[in-house]
Amino acid sequence: MRYLALLIAQLKIRYIYLKRYYFDTLSMIVTIFLVFLIIFFGATWLLGGTPGDTGDTLEGIVVGFMVWTFALMAYSTLSWGMIEEAQQGTLEQLYMSPLGFGWVTILRVAAHFIFNLLIVIVILLLMMGTTGRWLNLDVLSLIPLVLLTIAGAYGIGFFMGGLALVFKRVQSALQILQFVLVIFIAAPFGWMPFMRFLPLSLGTRLIGAVMIDGRTLLELPPGDVLVLIANSAVYFGLGFLAFKLFEDVARDRGLLGHY
Amino acid sequence: MDTVLEVKDLTKRYRRRRAEPVMAIDRVSFAVRKNEVVGLLGPNGAGKTTTIKCIAGLIKANSGEIWLDGIEAQRQPKRAMERVAALLEGNRNIYWRLTPRENLEFFAGIQGHMVGKVKRYIDELIELFDLKDKEHTSARMLSRGMQQKLALACALVRQTEVLLLDEPTLGLDVETSYELRHALKQMAARGERTILLSSHDMHVVEDICERVVIINNGRVVVDDRVSNLIKLFRASAYRFELEGRLVEQLELKLKERFPLLALSATDHRTYIDADLKDGSELYEVLDLLKAGGTQIKSIGHKEPDLEEIFLAIVRGQLE
């Protein structure tokens, strides 16, 4: 019941922000969509065809961009979110929850995931409508794959959030990381197999297999799904562990309330 | 009465790169009984905030124990957090983009309270802190005083036994400080909470606290009831009323011998306020005045206020 109260509180605050600052929410959707259009039509031009005849590459861009948007939102929740909380002085209050700061953060992540999913669906529909590439939306296969894929991004978010607790000014690193995520998503592990172990990399391919090739979760290679599960657990776990270590350092140095 | 908060030999050293560690608090010990309101005083850097943040679990102490209602806070932090809430750094601690009601509901949720169950209490807090007219206004649109009241209400909505208040009136103008003090007084008068309050505002402390713990250089130097301290200092605080103004040479001599002595003057009178340890110091002042040819109109005991007592203790320690 107490954890439910915490989850409701996190859902409510997220809902209020998105609704009250609807212009900001809309601007975010429009900006992401415009960036997508530039990339998509840029790629169409580079590939020398019309959006209708360039095959899987462009569909791959739609899927990759969707995962990148989701990943970006996921890790921003923790990293930029932590900075914002420290700046306004509410971080210490969250830390004082008897349910534990770990749960406060995890349930915040859950609340943000739900709303981010809705936003990403809107962006995806816009992308598919504009490009005329209607991808397969097998929800039952996609939800677990998206969850597993994005878990890696949350792991990175936890790590960066932990860094923000100790070092405070990590904005430059966060900005660079946005582009590193692109590398993870587009990692060519066809000829560099080790790259499948990078966060987001394998998950993006498997999501692509569902959305582009029309396969279901059960039709995907079990080995790949197992690697994805292990990958997600490792990155999420390591990120969370690092976060707890940084939190400990911040407590030792009395840095939780500083910015 | 039962002890609700007990700090035993609490020590915190901050490590520094390529420098000696800084001792923030050194074996600090004190206890607070149920529903007691205790002031934690000390000059800047004395260790008040470190002590409060250690109790709140926000800073990890090097050694010592913190007992909250029978729970050792460092060993069982989650259970301890059920018993303590804190207001830190004045008007921070609240979400500026949320309204007062939304803030209160969020912080109740963070504590694990379902909003439906605390709705009546939230209504009460909104009434208590005069936030009714602004309950649906963004916190950033509120005056600083209102924001600070809201931050206090957010700490209260957690419904913990112990409340830690670190500089609750910091940065407020006189009128707003008075308003918040009034709210704090009302809250203290209800006797529902055990409060540890740190403040530089001695009026707040004198108004609200029954007892004070004074920390200097990271160590507890006084732990006593406010009334006892006033009684103690009343016995040694003298006020001399002199005819006319003092000659400069005599003034210098007096200040050289008694650096803490305070002089004030009107057109025809001079007043000397001094804290004299014993009879011999009183005779010394009298001798100096006599030698200076000064006519004494009256000598009496002065009613000290907490600020003077605090300064005397801290300065005495520093010298």
Image: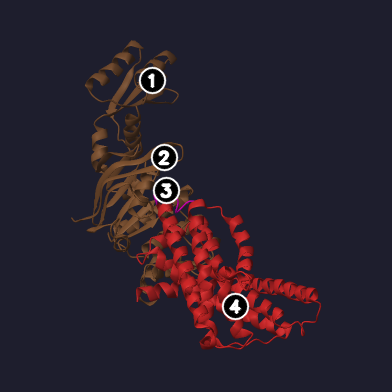
- Asked if labels 3 and 4 touch by Cβ distance under 8 angstroms, the answer is no
Q: CA distance from mark 4 to mark 2?
A: 58 Å
- Measured as percent of width and height from the top left, residue A232 is found at 49, 72
Left or right: where does residue B307 sit relative to residue A73? left
Provide the residue span drawn in magenta.
Answer: A252-258
Q: Which mark, residue A253?
A: 3
Q: Amino acid at mark 3?
A: Arg
Q: Secondary structure at mark 3?
A: helix
Q: Amino acid at mark 2?
A: Asn
Left or right: where does residue B54 sit relative to residue B69? right
- Measured as percent of width and height from the top left, residue B159 is found at 33, 65
Which residue was labeled with disc 1?
Answer: B255
- Asked if labels 3 and 1 touch by Cβ distance under 8 angstroms, the answer is no
Q: Nearer the viewer, residue B293 or B44?
A: B44
Q: CA distance from mark 1 to mark 4?
A: 83 Å
Between circles 4 and 2, the one closer to the viewer is: 4
- Find chain B in the image and tell me its colour: brown
Q: CA distance from mark 1 to mark 3?
A: 43 Å
- Asked if labels 2 and 4 touch by Cβ distance under 8 angstroms, the answer is no
Density class for disc 3 (Cα within 10 Å; few <14, some 14-19, many ≥20) is some
Q: Quadrant of residue A53?
A: bottom right
Marks 1 and 2 on same chain: yes
Q: Secondary structure at mark 1?
A: helix
Q: Which mark, residue A205?
A: 4
- Find chain A in the image and tell me its colour: red
Q: Residue at x 33, y 11 (%)?
A: B291
Left or right: where does residue A106 sit relative to residue B33? right
Work out whether mark 4 precedes mark 3 in sequence or the reverse, and give the earlier one. Answer: 4
Between circles 4 and 3, the one closer to the viewer is: 4
Q: CA distance from mark 3 to mark 2?
A: 19 Å
